[in-house]
């Protein structure tokens, strides 16, 4: 990157000087880490320096029966069924499929008894909020 495009805005955080810089995303990874849970990582390049951004837990299996984060659950289960930890490793992996001519009901691990049925595990429809219902009735 050209030094002329670096935007230098000074901020102070944790006792150090922070600068705003332009960067290029070199790689984007969604990974299921045994300790951290489902994480997303962006590998950034600025001025020839490489640094990762992310590693925040986006989803973790809790087993407490609480509300499901639909996006996190879909990604987590797709990785689990394929037997991989990285989203980039999904292409080429074999899975079992339960389907008819127009619809795939669920996918499963090629050997283990691990299945993902989004229709049962994720709620794709929702009841309209009270305010939305009132607005529709007023029209």
Image: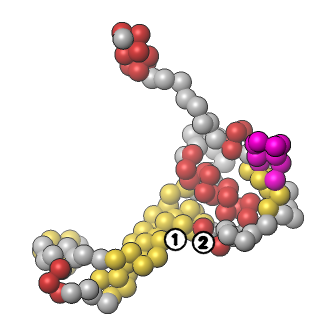
Question: What span is in magenta?
Answer: 97-106
Judged left or right of residue 126, residue 139 is: left
Magenta stretch, overall SS: strand
What residue do we see at 36% from left, 11% from top?
139
Furthest-front residue in this view? 101
Q: Residues within 10 Å of mark 1 (few under 14, many from 20)?
A: some
Q: Are marks 1 and 2 in contact (CB under 8 Å)?
A: yes
- Indicate the position of residue 47 as horizontal and vertical percent values: 27, 87
SS of the residue under disc 1 = strand
Queried whether the magenta region covers residue 104, the answer comes back as yes
**The image quarter in which residue 22 lies:** bottom left
The quadrant of the rendering that contains the N terminus is bottom left
Q: Nearer the viewer, residue 116 or 16?
A: 116
Judged left or right of residue 45, residue 118 is: right
- Indicate the position of residue 74 as horizontal and vertical percent values: 62, 52
Q: Nearer the viewer, residue 54 or 134?
A: 134
Query: Disc 1 to disc 2, how far (Cα)?
Result: 7 Å
What residue did someone put label 1 on? 29
What residue did someone put label 2 on? 88
What residue do we see at 55% from left, 29% from top?
126
Judged left or right of residue 8, residue 64 is: right
Furthest-bottom residue in this view? 48
**The image quarter in which residue 89 lies:** bottom right
In this picture, is 104 found above or below 21?
Answer: above
What residue do we see at 14% from left, 84% from top?
4
Q: Residues within 10 Å of mark 2 (few under 14, many from 20)?
A: few
SS of the residue under disc 2 = helix
Residue 33 appears in the picture as rendered: no
Queried whether the magenta region covers residue 12, the answer comes back as no
């Amino acid at each position: 990157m050209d030094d002329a495009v670096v935007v230098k805005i000074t901020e102070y955080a944790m006792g150090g000087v922070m600068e705003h810089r332009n960067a290029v995303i070199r790689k984007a990874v969604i990974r299921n880490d045994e300790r951290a849970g489902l994480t997303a990582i962006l590998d950034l390049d600025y001025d020839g320096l490489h640094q990762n951004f992310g590693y925040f837990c986006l989803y973790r299996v809790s087993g407490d029966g609480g509300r499901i984060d639909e996006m996190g659950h879909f990604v987590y289960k797709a990785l689990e069924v394929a037997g991989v930890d990285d989203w980039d490793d999904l292409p080429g992996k074999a899975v079992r499929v339960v389907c008819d001519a127009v619809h795939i009901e669920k996918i499963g691990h090629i050997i283990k008894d691990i299945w993902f049925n989004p229709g049962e595990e994720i709620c794709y429809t929702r009841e309209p909020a009270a305010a939305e219902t009132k607005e529709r009735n007023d029209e």
